[in-house]
Amino acid sequence: MTVYESLLERRKRVRLHMTLLDPDKQTAEEAGRLASGAARSGSDAIMIGGSTGVTQEKADATVLAIKSAVSIPTILFPASAANLSRHADALYFMSLLNSRDPRLIVGEQRRAAPLVKKWGLETIPMAYLVIEPGMRAGEVGRADPILRSKPEEAVEYALAAQMLGMRLVYLEAGSGAPEPVPSEMIRAVRAAIDIPLVVGGGIRTAEAAGAVARAGADVVVTGTVVEREKDGEALRRIIEAVKAV
Ligand code: 1GP
């Protein structure tokens, strides 16, 4: 079974939570420890990536440390073709559809493709949509962020993504965003598409995570909260809230 198939299987029973770890934010050893805590708290997969400063060496070391610490899938969430690792279980083969720069829409993907083929890495085609404010992801991705008041724009992109054959849509408010993607936008996109919807950015509390899941997110992603709250209590409550929907 592929990673994507196993996630779909699991989604039939519960909504999913994924933990994002940025290889540039801690040592590989520390990433392994954080991943292990996240898995114990019930997270369904570890996403590995960051907007800046991630090299292939850092990605490799982090993926290997995480893989030796947990058995849940490790999925790359790369900002460019230069920060991939052959050791991950799968790769979000993502296109930042609302970027102004073709490099982020298909350029990095073109550079990555031969390597990914050589490694035999599972690819999960994913539309990446940056919602205002977008934070670093919006800047690095040269995005024209979708305004929070324009759910219909997110719907157009998400439908186009599905028609292009993509298997996931990710609504990204940006790591550390003051607020998550608005519920109204999540609801509108969820109602329009058949493929799973991933939502992340600015989710720091169980209340916020529950609201995002209730609005229709199939997968809720948190990053910052895992790096900040080393005791794991906040994460446990967030995951509980997602699974309760
Ligand atoms: C960023 O959506 C993720 O790509 C996670 O965001 O760090 O705000 O949880 P946070």
Image: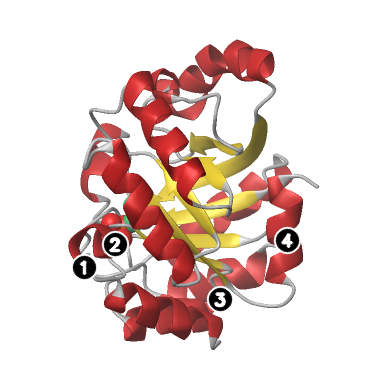
Label 1 element class: loop
Pick whichever of labels 4 and 1 is earlier in the sequence. Answer: 4
Q: Is residue 100 visible?
A: no
Compared with 106, 114 (above or below) is above
Ligand 1 has an atom within 8 Å of the beta carbon of the residue at disc 2: yes
What whole-number distance in Å separates the C-alpha atoms at marks 4 and 1?
Answer: 29 Å
Identify residue type, mark 1: Glu
What whole-number distance in Å separates the C-alpha atoms at marks 2 and 3?
Answer: 23 Å
Query: Horizontal and vertical percent for residue 198?
Result: 52, 60
Q: Pick the quarter of the image with the C terminus.
A: bottom right
Label 3 element class: loop
Identify residue for label 1.
Answer: 229
Q: Residue at x 70, y 67 (%)?
A: 10
Q: Residues within 10 Å of mark 4 (few under 14, many from 20)?
A: some
Identify residue for label 4.
Answer: 8
Asked if marks 1 and 2 touch (Cβ < 8 Å), the reply is yes
Q: Residues within 10 Å of mark 2 (few under 14, many from 20)?
A: many
Identify residue for label 2.
Answer: 226
Pick whichever of labels 3 and 4 is earlier in the sequence. Answer: 4
Compared with 56, 152 (above or below) is below
Identify residue for label 3.
Answer: 216
Pick whichever of labels 4 and 2 is earlier in the sequence. Answer: 4
Q: Residue at x 51, y 42 (%)?
A: 67
> Mark on residue 25?
none
Q: Residues within 10 Å of mark 3 (few under 14, many from 20)?
A: many
Q: Nearer the viewer, residue 24 or 204?
A: 24
What whole-number distance in Å separates the C-alpha atoms at marks 3 and 4?
Answer: 15 Å
Pick whichever of labels 2 and 3 is earlier in the sequence. Answer: 3
**Left or right of 110 on screen, residue 226:** left
Compared with 41, 171 (above or below) is above
Query: Horizontal and vertical percent for residue 154?
Result: 48, 58
